[in-house]
Amino acid sequence: MDLKGVRLVGIWGMGGVGKTTAARALFNRYYQNFEGACFLEDVKEYLQHHTLLYLQKTLLSKLLKVEFVDCTDTEEMCAILKRRLCSKKVLVVLDDVNHNDQLDKLVGAEDWFGSGSRIVITTRDMKLLKNHDVHETYEVKVLERDEAIELFNLHAFKRNSPETEFKELLNLVVDYTGGLPLALKVLGSLLYKEDLDVWISTIDRLKATPEGEIMATLKISFDGLRDYEK
């Protein structure tokens, strides 16, 4: 993070694999080294409820610690961002970007930012990073099976090895997560101190979830785990 010039860094991989966690760790470690810093979390979801113009204003406000500017057009706001930030060394994290326009309007080009600035982008789509000429890209991959089991055990049993009667069910749960750290953590936490009946019920729910829809799996697990108690 001490190199001169403006650098764009991309972190990509499937949902739940740990991209946001990695970006947050970078941000927390280095943000004090910059004149301004902003972590815009879950951009895709944020834009379901707000306009891109509002997000542009939010970015500038957080980086410079100023009030929202009076502007009604995204293109005009691009010019304002460039003018106000081109001499500033800033750290920007755009989390879960899913459209080229988001990058164009929020971090347009290198000359928008001062020397030493770092722009970190997390996304599920590697093509977005290529289209925006991101300098460095890092893929966050799913865990190997042994790593997945260890992570799940730490959340479900608070130790590295499971109780004997849960071993077979543990393997089934880990298989359904596909090695995604977020899924392993959530399911492990939900099953902590639960009995075999709850484990079996959870596995039945996982079986009913289409392959690849891990976020749906998490929602089913979180929202419906205790249906039998209602």
Image (cartoon, grey):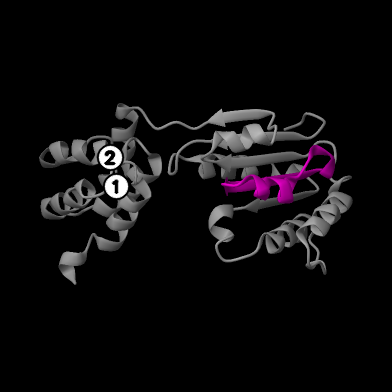
Which image quadrant: the C terminus?
bottom left
Give the residue number, with chain letter if any, for mark 2.
Answer: 153
The amino acid type, in three-letter code, at marker 2 is: Asn
Which residues make up the magenta segment?
Answer: 89-112
The residue closer to the viewer here, 179 or 194, is 179
In the rendered image, the vertical position of residue 135 relative to residue 25, given as above or below? above
The secondary element bearing badge 1 is classed as helix
Q: Is residue 192 above or below residue 15?
A: below
Q: Is residue 201 left or right of residue 190?
A: left
Disc 2/disc 1 C-alpha distance (Å):
7 Å
Looking at the rendering, in which quadrant would you find the N terminus?
top right
Q: Are marks 2 and 1 in contact (CB under 8 Å)?
A: yes
Locate residue 31 relative to residue 156 in the image: left or right.
Answer: right
Q: Is residue 216 left or right of residue 10?
A: left
Q: Which residue is mark 1?
A: 188
The part of the image, by quadrant, that contains residue 77 is bottom right
> Which residue is pictured at 68% across the width and 32% down the height?
134
Disc nearer the start of the sequence (2/1): 2
What's the residue type where badge 1 is placed?
Gly
Left or right? Give the position of 2 relative to 170. right
Q: What is the quadrant of residue 14 in the picture?
A: top left
Q: Position of residue 162 (x, y in %)?
A: 20, 38
- Residue 42 in sight in this render: no
Residue at (83% x, 44% y) in the render: 112
Residue at the image point whose x is 53% and y is 45% from the top: 20
Residue 66, image quadrant: bottom right
Indicate the position of residue 150 as horizontal and vertical percent values.
Answer: 31, 34
Crowd class of label 2 (few under 14; some 14 to 19; many from 20; radius 10 Å): many
Q: Is residue 95 visible to the viewer in this orientation of the structure?
A: yes
